[in-house]
């Protein structure tokens, strides 16, 4: 199944060159429908998470104006090995085969253990698709080859410079090596959102307003093992549980009602969700 997923990704990646909008629909809408079917068969829950984002560190070298990191210090803290192994073990327990990412609001390449993490996931969760989401600032050919050999299946690299020409040129040899395994884009290709109210993008031409929630279908695990509501919870206000204390299914099901209200009825109960969906900006939690 993993080989089929990778083959389809390579096939669809060629479409992006000619029709980016069609590519987005195929990737996001198509994968959503696919995951609904698979998750219902495996877990009797079509809204079960299809991706895991593991915050292996807290540091990012960038201060992009559309990211909360611009206003707050991002100290270098790292997930310890025991916690990372526990994450993998918890996912083994539920036979997880979805996407495995190494980011929250951090830059994964600044963790020197990344290749070791990828090797560990490849060995223990061989059916997962490992995805590196990165700004690519310190990515080079040697590092790309090392990570690819270690088990990274997809590199999603976004150049965040106002003038991206130089960095795009620098990364082209990496793209030539990785080919379809690497999606190289600029910040101009992103659709920006308010990160649950953490940033103001009201004047952005690339602003997107979610009509329905897009982010609560992933599992987000912080460096200390906390599971937060979604990838927009920059301040980690909505902690659903900790994998050191409870198993993943228990934590995931603990906020099932909130999740289903969002996904079935587009009803936002929490303040952060109302801000994201712009359902009620003035209401306070």
Image (tube, rainbow, N blue to C red):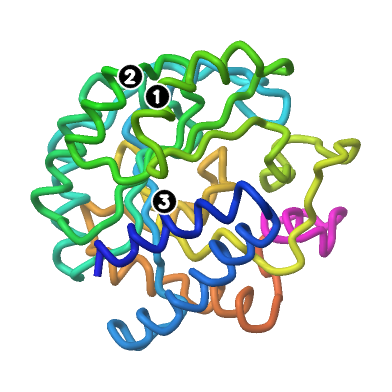
The residue located at (52%, 52%) in the rendering is 14
Q: Secondary structure at mark 1?
A: helix
The residue located at (28%, 20%) in the rendering is 143
Q: Residues within 10 Å of mark 2 (few under 14, many from 20)?
A: some
Q: Rounded to the nearest whole Å, what is the CA distance between mark 3 and mark 1? A: 29 Å
- The boundaries of the magenta stretch are 271-285
> In the rendering, which numbered label is found on residue 94?
none
Q: Closer to the camera: disc 2 or disc 3?
A: 2
Q: Secondary structure at mark 2?
A: helix
Spot occupied by residue 9 in the image (x, y as percentages of width and height): 42, 57
Residue identifier under label 3: 220
Q: Which one is nearer the viewer's eye here, 161 or 23?
A: 23
Residue identifier under label 2: 141
The residue located at (38%, 52%) in the rendering is 227
Q: Are marks 2 and 1 in contact (CB under 8 Å)?
A: yes
Q: Rounded to the nearest whole Å, what is the CA distance between mark 2 and mark 3? A: 29 Å
Q: Which one is nearer the viewer's eye here, 265 or 51?
A: 51
């Amino acid at each position: 199944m993993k080989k089929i997923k990778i083959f389809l990704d390579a096939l669809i990646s060629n479409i992006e060159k000619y029709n980016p909008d069609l590519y987005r629909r195929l990737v996001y809408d198509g994968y959503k429908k696919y995951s609904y079917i698979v998750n219902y068969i495996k877990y009797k829950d079509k809204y079960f998470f299809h991706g895991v984002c593991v915050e292996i560190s807290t540091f990012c070298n960038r201060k992009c104006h559309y990211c909360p990191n611009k206003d707050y210090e991002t100290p270098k803290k790292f997930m310890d090995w025991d916690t990372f192994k526990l994450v993998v073990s918890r996912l083994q327990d539920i036979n997880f085969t979805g996407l495995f990412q190494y980011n929250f609001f951090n830059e994964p390449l600044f963790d020197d253990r990344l290749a070791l993490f990828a090797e560990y996931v490849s060995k223990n969760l061989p059916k997962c698709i490992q995805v590196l989401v990165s700004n690519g600032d310190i990515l080079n050919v040697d590092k790309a080859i090392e990570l690819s050999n270690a088990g990274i299946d997809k590199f999603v690299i976004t150049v965040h410079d106002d003038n991206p020409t130089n960095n795009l040129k620098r990364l082209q040899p990496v793209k030539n090596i990785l080919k379809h395994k690497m999606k190289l884009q600029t910040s101009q290709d992103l659709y920006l959102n308010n990160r649950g109210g953490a940033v103001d993008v009201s004047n952005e031409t690339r602003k997107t307003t979610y009509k329905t929630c897009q982010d609560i279908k992933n599992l987000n695990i912080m460096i200390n093992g906390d599971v937060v509501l979604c990838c927009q919870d920059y301040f980690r206000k909505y902690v659903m549980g900790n994998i050191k204390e409870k198993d993943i299914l228990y934590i995931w099901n603990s906020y099932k009602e909130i999740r289903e209200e969002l996904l079935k009825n587009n009803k936002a109960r929490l303040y952060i969700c109302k801000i994201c969906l712009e359902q009620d900006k003035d209401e306070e939690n």
